[in-house]
Image (cartoon, grey):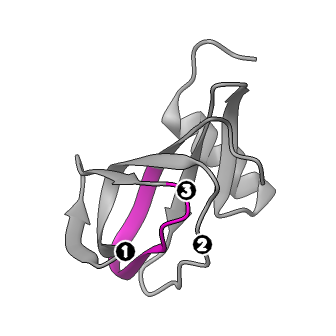
Amino acid sequence: MRNFLHLTELDSERKHARKLYLEFLRVSAMSAGIYVLSPGQADPQSPHREDELYYVVRGKARMRVGSEDQPVSSGALIFVAAGVEHRFYEITEELLVLVFFAPAESG
C-alpha cells in the first residue's frame, strides 16, 4: 500500500490498464479509486452495497442520485447511500472523479 499518491500517476495507471475505474486504496473500513468518463460516454454503474462519496476533480456532467438530479463540476461532492440508483450523464467535459466506498467495496 502506498501512503502518498498523485492523481496524474493514478490516471496514467488507469489509462494503461484501459479501465474506467482504478482502485488505488483498499483497507477494511474503506476503498478508493478514480473514475473517468469521456464526453458523451454512458456511465455503466449500478447500485453498490456500500455507501459512496464522489469528489469531482474535473469535468462537467449531470448526475442523478435516486430522484435528485443536478449538474456537477470541479469541486462537487456527492453522497450516494448503499443500494441507491445513481448515474453520471450528459458528460460535456472529461469527468475525473475520486470515489470513496465505506466499508471497502465488495465488488
Name which residue lies at 40% across and 68% down: 94
Any magenta on residue 93? yes
Using a 10 Å C-alpha cutoff, classify the residue at mark 1 as few (fewer than 14 neighbours), some (14 to 19) or many (20 or more).
few
Query: Is 56 left, or right, of 32 in this rendering?
Result: left
**Contact (Cβ within 8 Å) of mark 2 with mark 3:** no
> Label 2 is placed on what type of residue?
Gln
- What is the spatial separation of the Cα atoms under label 2 and label 3, in whole angstroms? 11 Å
Q: Residue furthest top?
A: 3
Name the main secondary structure of what is drawn in magenta. Answer: strand
Q: Nearer the viewer, mark 2 or mark 3?
A: 2
**Contact (Cβ within 8 Å) of mark 3 with mark 1:** no
| Region in magenta | 82-97
Query: Is 67 left, or right, of 4 in this rendering?
Result: left
- What is the spatial separation of the Cα atoms under label 3 and label 1, in whole angstroms? 20 Å
Front position in the image: 75 or 18: 75
**Residue placed under numbered mark 3 in the picture:** 35
Dot 1 or dot 2, earlier in sequence: 2
**Residue placed under numbered mark 2 in the picture:** 45
